Image: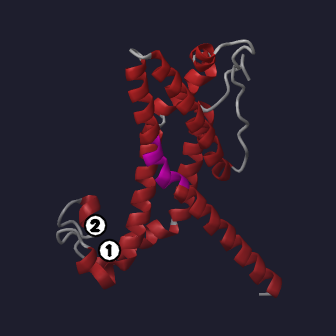
């Protein structure tokens, strides 16, 4: 193997490890962020039904959250997501009319809808990523630290297939090895799918883009 080949291998490995870090960060942060967005949206719409300025403020918050999400999916998709156009308030509008401008903007309501439904795919993706990382790390460590890493005496096999299914730490090691070998493609696929769903949900309304 030449020096050029070794450098190419290192670059290849480095790119995949970096992408694994970016994908894992995206997935593991996606669940808590989506729950925050859901809480803000649902609480705001509930209070906004009584106090209109709160509803307008909620739509402004959803707009900011959507802009943050567009930036967050960029490293996963490898492309930038242009921000949509929002309807500005008329130049001669007063303070109240400026604050209430989001109420008549379809794009703001689309951002609100994103905040409400985003938690469903985000939680599913979070579960897959967490399962793969946990299975790989716990499984590989089980032959050495089975006692300290077990949960009430359960092995990885017990946790996955039921208590008493497989008691051998070497089965746990095999499961962990398989999950480690498939960690990069699984996390990449789940992150790409989740980010693609987010990209569709964050699309611009055609008549205001």
Magenta stretch prevailing secondary structure: helix
Q: Earlier in the sequence, mark 2 or mark 1?
A: 2
Can you name the residue that lies furthest to the front here?
Answer: 95
Asked which quadrant contains residue 51, the reply is top left
Neighbourhood count class around disc 1 (C-alpha, 10 Å): few under 14, some 14–19, many 20 upward:
some
Image spot of residue 38 (x, y percent): 43, 34
Q: How many marks?
A: 2
Name the element at disc 1. helix
- In the picture provided, is 192 more to the left or to the right than 91? left
Please give the label number shown on residue 190: none
Report the residue at 18% width, 72% height from top.
Answer: 153
The numbered dot on residue 171 is 1
**21 vs 67: above or below:** below
Please give the name of the residue rendered at 46% of the width and 23% of the height, measured from the top-left corner. Answer: 54
- Image quadrant containing the C terminus: top right
* Front-lying residue, 50 or 94: 94
Instruction: Assess disc 2: are there few (<14), some (14-19) or many (≥20) residues with their C-alpha within 10 Å of its C-alpha.
Output: many
Left or right side of 111 for 176: left
User: Helix or strand or loop: what does disc 2 sit on?
Assistant: helix
Distance between the Cα atoms at labels 2 and 1? 7 Å
Instruction: Report if residue 188 lies within the magenta region.
Output: no
Residue 124 lies, in percent from the top left, at: 42, 45
Report which residue position mark 2 lands on.
157
User: In this picture, is 3 found above or below 48?
Assistant: below
Q: Which percent across, then down, holds residue 30?
A: 49, 48
- The answer to whether mark 2 and mark 1 are in CB contact below 8 A is yes
Q: Considering the image in quadrants, where does the N terminus appear?
A: bottom right
Vertically, is 72 above or below 129? above
User: In this picture, which residue range is highlighted in magenta?
Assistant: 26-34
Asked whether residue 33 is drawn in magenta, I would say yes
Q: Residue at x 26, y 59 (%)?
A: 161
Task: Name the residue rendered at 46%, 31% in the picture.
Answer: 117
């Amino acid at each position: 193997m030449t020096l050029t080949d070794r450098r190419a291998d290192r670059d290849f490995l480095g790119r995949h490890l970096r992408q694994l870090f970016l994908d894992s960060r995206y997935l593991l942060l996606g669940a808590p962020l989506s729950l925050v967005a859901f809480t803000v949206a649902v609480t705001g719409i509930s209070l906004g039904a009584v106090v209109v300025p709160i509803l307008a403020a909620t739509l402004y918050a959803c707009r900011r959250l959507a802009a943050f999400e567009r930036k967050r999916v960029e490293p996963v998709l490898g492309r930038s997501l242009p921000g949509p156009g929002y309807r500005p308030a008329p130049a001669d509008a007063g303070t109240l009319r400026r604050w209430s401008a989001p109420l008549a903007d379809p794009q703001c309501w689309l951002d609100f809808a994103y905040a409400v439904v985003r938690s469903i795919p985000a939680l599913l993706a979070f579960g897959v990523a967490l399962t793969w990382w946990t299975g790989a790390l716990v499984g590989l460590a089980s032959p050495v630290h089975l006692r300290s890493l077990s949960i009430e005496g359960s092995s990885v096999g017990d946790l996955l297939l039921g208590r008493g299914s497989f008691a051998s730490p070497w089965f746990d090691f095999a499961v962990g090895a398989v999950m480690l070998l498939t960690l990069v493609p699984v996390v990449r696929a789940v992150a790409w799918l989740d980010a693609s769903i987010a990209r569709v949900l964050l699309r611009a309304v055609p008549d205001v883009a």
